[in-house]
Image (spheres, rainbow, N blue to C red):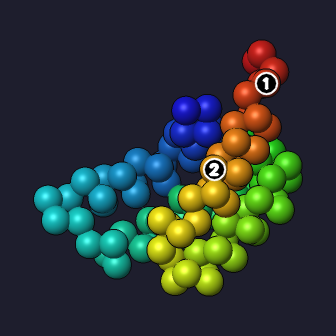
Amino acid sequence: QILLEDIARYCPQQFLSFHQCMALPQPDPEHCLNQQIELTKCIKTVVPSFQKIQATCSGKLQAYEACLRMYKSDTRRCTNELEGLRSCAFGSIQKRPIE
């Protein structure tokens, strides 16, 4: 929830553009690739909560990505790695400073 709020807050244009593309009657992921790339760039460079997760949980993120590569993106085989990543991510952004 916190991450999604930060993405909408810090990357509003890219977030809206990607979601409008994906909301088309028959969304084509290939058609929305440019919007996805722009959103990803913004998230990686501007969103504070993502940067905190990336810094704190890089090992868990790498383990999950390696599992996905090993099992050809079969997410069912990487549930332990995903759970570890989610737990780390939640713990790293759970305590936010009051703005």
Q: Is residue 91 rendered to the left or right of residue 31?
A: right
Identify which residue is drawn at 58% across, 43% down. 7
Locate residue 63: give its quadrant: bottom right
Q: Secondary structure at mark 1?
A: loop
Residue 3's x, y, as percent?
A: 61, 39
Q: Earlier in the sequence, mark 2 or mark 1?
A: 2
Q: Amino acid at mark 1?
A: Lys
Q: Which mark is residue 95?
A: 1
Q: Secondary structure at mark 2?
A: helix
Residue 2's x, y, as percent?
A: 61, 32
Q: Which mark is residue 83?
A: 2
| Quadrant housing the C terminus | top right
Identify which residue is drawn at 75% across, 68% down. 62
Q: Is residue 35 rendered to the left or right of residue 79?
A: left
In the image, is residue 12 above or below residue 31? above
Residue 61's x, y, as percent?
A: 73, 62
Residue 41's x, y, as percent?
A: 63, 63
In the image, is residue 70 above or below residue 15? below
Locate residue 79: give its quadrant: bottom right
How many residues crowd around disc 1 within 10 Å: few (fewer than 14), some, or many (20 or more)? few
| Mark-to-mark CA distance, 2 and 1 | 19 Å
Q: Is residue 28 rendered to the left or right of residue 10?
A: left
Identify which residue is drawn at 77% across, 59% down. 60
Identify which residue is drawn at 55% across, 32% down. 1
Q: How many marks?
A: 2
